[in-house]
Amino acid sequence: MSPDKRGPTERRPEAAVAVGPWPRWMRVAFAVLGAGYIASVALGGMGWSRTELPGPVRFFTEASCLFPRAALMAIEYRAEGYDCSARAWVPVDVRPDFPIHSENKESGFHRTMYFFRREARVMAALDDYLVEQNAKRDLPLGGVRLSSIRIPFPRPGESVERFEYKLIDAYPADWHKAWYRTPQRRVKERCGGGS
């Protein structure tokens, strides 16, 4: 029988509606709690202080505070060596001395500088190692200067260059941040009394 020719006693079939497993009041309570949680996370990202919330609640709503500041630049590490004969600081390519992942920022040199750049003993050991390795290649150095290069990220929409290893002198001087320099007395010893 067509839908238009039903008799007065025939009813339309009820539409099937999915119903949650809990009572309606519980489903509404969970929806309100979920909306409150999302709102507190969003408000936290906008600077709202949650000090008035109980500790466990505050802990689970601080997700947006984990990374409050976006990085504005990439950081790479480079070395310079003191050439005793030229009496000048010259760029040093450390890739031959750290062959594993030498063409990217996961090399041993980058990892050492990232984790230990503030550790004087580690920097002194790295100094000795680089001087010894360069001496084996007939590039005698009196010391090293170890720096980070802070390369600004391009603006949104600008093209991003693939990583390419460049020596330190390829970057503007105001992008350099020195972390370690061989003590002057040590440079003089290695250079045979010259400076």
Image: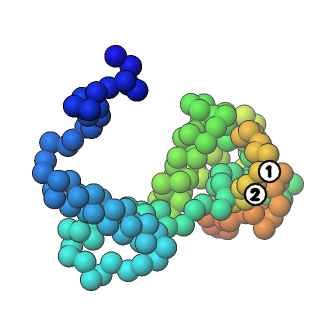
Whether residue 129 is visible to the viewer of this picture, yes or no, is no
Residue 57: percent from left, percent from top:
23, 68
State the residue position of label 2. 155
Q: Amino acid at mark 1?
A: Glu
Dot 2 crowding, Cα within 10 Å, few <14, some 14–19, many 20+:
few
Q: Is residue 185 above or below residue 75?
A: below
Pick out the residue farthest to the top. Answer: 1
Rendered image quadrant of residue 15: top left
**Which residue is painted at 59% across and 53% down in the image?**
127
Rendered image quadrant of residue 62: bottom left
* Residue sitting nearer the eye, 5 or 185: 5
**Which residue is painted at 64% across and 37% down in the image?**
104
**Which of the numbered marks, if any, corresponds to residue 97?**
none
Residue 64: percent from left, percent from top:
43, 63
State the residue position of label 1. 158
Element type at mark 1: loop
Check contact, mark 1 vs mark 2: CB within 8 A: yes
Pick out the residue farthest to the bottom. Answer: 52
Q: Amino acid at mark 2?
A: Arg
Alpha carbon distance from label 1 to label 2: 6 Å
Q: Is residue 46 left or right of residue 136?
A: left
**Which residue is painted at 38% across and 80% down in the image?**
49
Q: Is residue 178 above or below residue 131?
A: below
